[in-house]
Image (cartoon, helix red, strand yellow):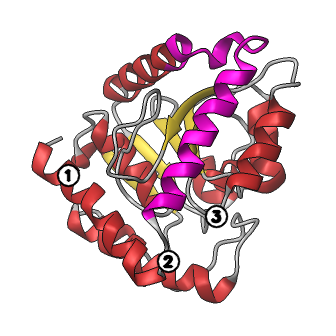
Amino acid sequence: MHEAVHQALIDVQDEVRKAFRWSVSSDRSSAEAMVDCVHSHSQTVQAWKPEACAATLERLKQELLEAPEVVVLGAAVSASEVAGLGEGCAIIAADGSVGALNDLTNLACVVSDFDGGIHLDSAAESGAVIVVHAHGDNPQRWLNSLEAWSHFANPPSLVLSHQTPSLLSNAHNFGGFTDGDRAVCFALAMGVQKEQIRLIGFSLNEVGPWSATTIPALKLEKLVWMNRILKSVGLDDAVAK
């Protein structure tokens, strides 16, 4: 993806912080602590070692680039919408929307800030790849999830993400804000062309059934930013308005 576009998807995070009166310091401290937490568990979870996470990201990049179509699932997706997806597509699920999938065969990864509830935990227990995201108000959620996942017989492979302008060791800022638009930003950052990306289950005015942990009024405010970000990359036509 074009470097200037990618930077714009990161710069918008400063606008989001200003709009919601969030601090960049809390975003950074959460991200740094999450990196430390993953590292502390890597003595027993080999897939969470820094070199293993880097290898996971590279494998994921190749999978997305080789797929004829990358389908991103939003929180308003229905099971019937995913039932007809072609076998050759690579699916990126935004957090709890992974629950719409009866079969994880085509699932490339889940993009999550840890509020996907039982659906996220089920995907994690299956050993799915999860792009885990830290921000200022989710430290307790990522701490609880990572602790639980570390004891699974087949823990998920991880890619770590954050939303600060800083360069953090072993974590990446792929741009975007909500799980849905961040999933799109992730695909673009991997080099996937926007023409190869299809969005399903994205809505501007509906809190989707797969949004497990959310405050409806606040979520609707966040969806305005989601739509703005998707519009900036030319993919907002698929958002129900």
- Image location of residue 40, percent across then percent down: 71, 23
- Mark 3 nearby-residue class (10 Å; few <14, some 14–19, many ≥20): few
Magenta segment's dominant SS is helix
Amino acid type at mark 2: Lys
Q: Give the range drawn in magenta.
A: 24-53
- One can see residue 206 in this view: no
**Of residues 135 and 226, the one drawn nearer to the viewer in this rendering:** 135
User: Mark 3 or mark 1: which comes first in sequence?
Assistant: 1
Disc sitting over residue 137 in the figure = 3
Residue assigned mark 2: 222
- Image location of residue 74, percent across then percent down: 54, 60
Label 2 – label 3 distance at C-alpha: 14 Å
Amino acid type at mark 3: Asp
- The residue shown at (45%, 29%) is 88
- Image location of residue 28, percent across then percent down: 49, 51
Q: What element carries label 2?
A: helix
User: Mark 2 or mark 3: which comes first in sequence?
Assistant: 3
**Of residues 241 and 8, the one drawn nearer to the viewer in this rendering:** 8
Q: Nearer the viewer, mark 1 or mark 2?
A: 1
- The residue shown at (75%, 34%) is 124
User: Mark 1 or mark 2: which comes first in sequence?
Assistant: 1
